[in-house]
Amino acid sequence: MAAPMPDTNDKSPLDHDISTHIFTTSAAMVGVCITVIGILRVIIAIRQADLIEDDMFAVNAMLYLVTCLMSYWSLRTRSVRRLHRLERISDTLFLVSLAMTTVNAGFLTWALSAH
């Protein structure tokens, strides 16, 4: 007898390991962004030139924080429907935040090399 085909529309919970990794990594990235902001503030004070990158990293840190909170909420929820929604939101926000970190790093490199 053939094994049943897996249902592609299955609404089983996504891998909780992913939510755990997103939770811990986004929390660490909040710390990274805050560290970069601190270093930038020192550079701004020394060079007496204002850079927008510290504001960009502040927004980036807030996005990582929202990602962290969403993944934490997904780990704590009991509703499968809410779990799926929160996991998708946290996954998407994490990728957006990661892309923003890369863009910020590029802007920061070009801004510091221009001065």
Image (spheres, grey):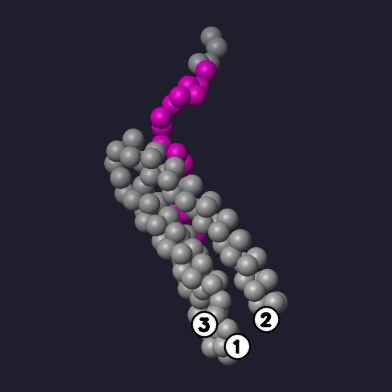
Q: Is residue 21 magenta?
A: yes
Closer to the observer: label 1 or label 3?
Answer: 1
Looking at this view, is 4 or 57 the one in front? 57
Three-letter code, disc 3: Arg
Closer to the observer: label 2 or label 3?
Answer: 2
Task: Return the x and y of residue 32 as percentages of the image width and height.
Answer: 52, 70
Which residue carries the number 2 mark?
115
Residue placed at 51% from the left, 67% from the top? Answer: 56
Image height check: is 96 above or below 59?
above
Image height check: is 9 above or below 81?
above
Which residue carries the number 1 mark?
47
Three-letter code, disc 1: Arg
Circles 1, 2 touching at the beta carbon (< 8 Å): yes
Work out how far the residue at label 1 is from the one at label 3, CA to CA, in angstroms. Answer: 10 Å
Q: Tell me the quadrant of the picture where the C terminus can be found.
A: bottom right
| The label number, if any, that marks residue 41 in the structure image | 3
Identify the element where label 2 is drawn. loop
Image height check: is 95 above or below 42?
above
Work out how far the residue at label 2 is from the one at label 3, CA to CA, in angstroms. Answer: 15 Å
- Report whether 77 appears left or right of 9: left
Identify the element where label 1 is drawn. helix
The quarter holding residue 80 reads: top left
Residue placed at 56% from the left, 76% from the top? Answer: 51
Sequence-earlier tag: 1 or 3: 3
Sequence-earlier tag: 1 or 2: 1
Task: Return the x and y of residue 40 as percentages of the image width and height.
Answer: 55, 79
- Report whether 76 appears left or right of 28: left
Q: Judge the density around disc 1: few (<14), some (14-19), many (≥20) Cα neighbours within 10 Å.
A: few
Q: Is residue 10 magenta?
A: yes
Looking at this view, is 53 or 39 the one in front? 53
